[in-house]
């Protein structure tokens, strides 16, 4: 879906839309950075795409919910051990860090109900949005920096020189964006499709 400000939005519904392949393709195209917040991170294909990008010089930063590391196999350890520019941490929040978000090159956000797992991609009924918008990406980067910083990480700054938190009032999104989509970090964006 092309938006009036030049951004675009793609929606996927599991299990029919092969959301894992869309996520892997988006991550594989990263040129500068991949940042993620993951409640559950067990999809080996997504881990392989991130590890490959890290070996290619792309900065990989992430935070994984600590309770999920005890729940079963996770890609957390293998991604931390992969060569490349990676900084993967566990959440320090005493409650669940329930985010499911990937920020690519400060331009693309992948978010929705789906965990980064095979079950979310191929069994569960889930929704995922891939949003190509520097403005939405800035909002997600702000939340990522807060969580990653609390976990002891030094988050690299966004690639754009101008970085500031945006509210809807300060937003440069055109007013003809009418439908409201709620993101998991309580950021609301008006969209028209």
Image: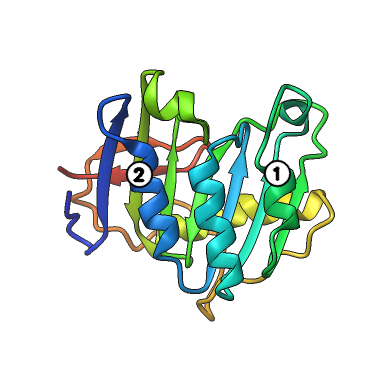
| Residue drawn at x 40%, y 30% as measured from the top left | 121
| Residue drawn at x 47%, y 67% as measured from the top left | 105
Residue indicated by mark 1: 76
Is residue 146 visible from the viewing direction of this image?
no
Taking 78 as reference, is 132 above or below it?
below
- In which quadrant will I find the C terminus? top left
Taking 118 as reference, is 29 above or below it?
below
Q: Nearer the viewer, residue 53 or 102?
A: 53
Residue indicated by mark 2: 21
Q: Residue 33, how many percent across, how many down?
A: 55, 67
| Residue drawn at x 18%, y 44% as measured from the top left | 192
Q: Residue 146, how many percent across, how many down?
A: 71, 52
Is residue 129 visible from the viewing direction of this image?
yes
**166 horizontally vs 99: left or right:** left
Taking 60 as reference, is 167 above or below it?
above
**113 horizontally vs 2: left or right:** right
Mark 2 secondary-structure assignment: helix
């Amino acid at each position: 879906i092309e938006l009036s400000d030049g951004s675009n939005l793609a929606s996927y519904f599991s299990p029919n839309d092969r959301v894992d392949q869309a996520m892997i393709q988006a991550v594989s195209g990263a040129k500068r950075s991949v940042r993620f917040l993951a409640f559950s991170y067990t999809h080996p294909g997504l881990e392989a795409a991130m590890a490959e990008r890290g070996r290619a010089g792309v900065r990989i930063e992430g935070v994984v919910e600590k309770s999920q590391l005890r729940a079963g196999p996770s890609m957390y350890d293998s991604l931390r051990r992969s060569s490349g520019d990676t900084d993967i941490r566990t959440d320090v929040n005493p409650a669940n860090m329930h985010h499911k978000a990937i920020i690519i090159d400060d331009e693309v956000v992948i978010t929705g109900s789906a965990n980064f797992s095979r079950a979310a991609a191929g069994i569960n009924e889930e929704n995922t949005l891939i949003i190509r918008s520097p403005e939405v990406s800035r909002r997600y980067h702000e939340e990522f920096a807060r969580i990653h910083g609390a976990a002891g990480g030094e988050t690299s700054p966004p690639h754009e020189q101008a970085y500031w938190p945006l509210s809807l009032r300060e937003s440069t999104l055109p007013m003809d964006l009418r439908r409201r989509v709620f993101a998991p970090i309580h950021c609301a964006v008006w969209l028209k499709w």
